[in-house]
Amino acid sequence: MQFFRIIHFLLLITSASAFAQKLTPLAPRPNWSSLDKFQHTITKEEFTRLLEQLYAPNGAWRGHFTIADDHVDVETSPGKPSYRLNFAANAAEAKPIPRYWQKKRSLQGMRIAIDPGHLGGGWARMEERWFRIGDNKPVAEGDMTLYVARLLKKELEQRGAKVFLTRNSSKPATKLRPKKLQKAAADSLRNDGRKINAATLKAESERLFYRTAEIRARAEKVNEGIRPDLVLALHFNAEGWGNPARPTLTNINHLHLLINGCYSADELSHEDQRHDLMVKLLNRSGAEEAAVSRTVAASMARATGLPPYTYSSAIAINAAGSPYVWARNLLANRLFECPVVYLEPYVMNNREVHARIQLGAYKGRHPVAGTMRENIFREYARGVADGLTAYYGK
């Protein structure tokens, strides 16, 4: 009975203002004046090209952006005036682009942040990035990405880079926990038209903790603390494994990388996402993301021998002239203001990948499907490091 009183209270205190301005869960209201530094830094032609070809293709921007000859008006909160960004008259008159990251020509001294995806440890099951087949060792994505991150950090430092980890354990960066997110979870469920009950409130509170609050805390650490020239977001992929109590393995295996882009009309109906798009577009991180990702993808394809993953839905578009690179709007590659290389190699519940994970971090090479190969973690780290070296040079 007490639980239902709590839910009723949460519904009552959901303010009308939360619905007046449509925001992504846990997103603060954007400070549009923070874009003033980008006045006269881009031409109409470049802005329109980036908006239509990368960030909001297929007309997703229409209704939220009004482009004139010398400016663009961007919708803000209901009842508030649009934000106006003035264009440069031409490329020669465009002001320098203000940003904290630098476009490097060498790994020497380059600041690189590595973001090991997810949390792992005691949070792995909550994140639903954990499974176990019989008596085998558990497969936990957050633990594996952290192990790869440590290997990659050492590899890149040996090549001259200054490397920082967004986490070095399974301890969350955010101070928020699911119990503190019940009101936000109730708001999220109600805004999406989903039922609010004990199960949905628990699941949404947990999701907001590990998928939203945690990523926002890491983004703050990156943008305000580390301020790197590049972020490497490390993940492992997975296909559906069915019943968590009896997960199944698959023969499917693939590789792809993601850059920020392909915002949908629904995503752009959120004020914070319109603002985030403007930051990424105006600081020109997209071109660097595409170029670096294309080179790293080629290196990873050689190292892993994996085919490219192909999206069959409109949530992503192929990009960078590579079958391995796709533009997709994710919270991490949107909030990290510098260029982001977002990696999704290996299907964790693929039979061969699962067998390689069970072999652990062995030294040297070991026969895998008739071929002598490094352990999967070192192969991952070396593939990324070699790709960055090929792009930036030592």
Image (spheres, rainbow, N blue to C red):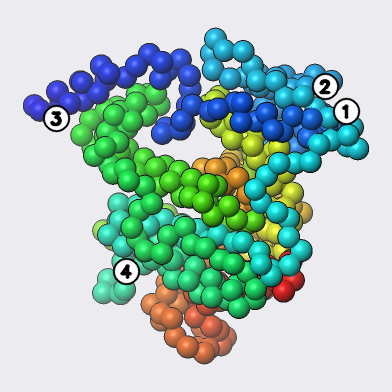
Other residues around mark 4 within 10 Å, as few (<14) / some (14–19) / many (≥20): some
Q: Amino acid at mark 2?
A: Asp
Question: Residue at position x 65%, y 73% from top?
Answer: 160
In the rendered image, the quadrant that contains the N terminus is top left
Q: Position of residue 376 (x, y in %)?
A: 50, 76
The residue identified by callout 3 is 3
Q: Is residue 354 left or right of residue 45?
A: left
Residue 390 disc label: none
Q: Amino acid at mark 1?
A: Ala
Query: Which one is in front in this view, the residue at disc 4 or the one at disc 1?
Result: 1
Residue 138 disc label: 4
Q: Position of residue 204 (x, y in %)?
A: 32, 37
SS class, disc 3:
helix
- How far apart marks 2 and 4 lie (CA) works out to 57 Å
The residue identified by callout 1 is 89
Q: Is residue 270 left or right of residue 182?
A: right
The residue identified by callout 2 is 70
SS class, disc 2:
loop
Question: Residue at position x 57%, y 12% from top?
Answer: 80
- How far apart marks 4 and 1 lie (CA) works out to 58 Å
Query: Which one is in front in this view, the residue at disc 2 or the one at disc 3?
Result: 2
Please tell me in which quadrant of the rendered image residue 245 appears: bottom left
Asked if disc 4 and disc 1 are in contact, CB closer than 8 Å, the reply is no
Q: Choose between 279 and 118: the one closer to the eye.
A: 279
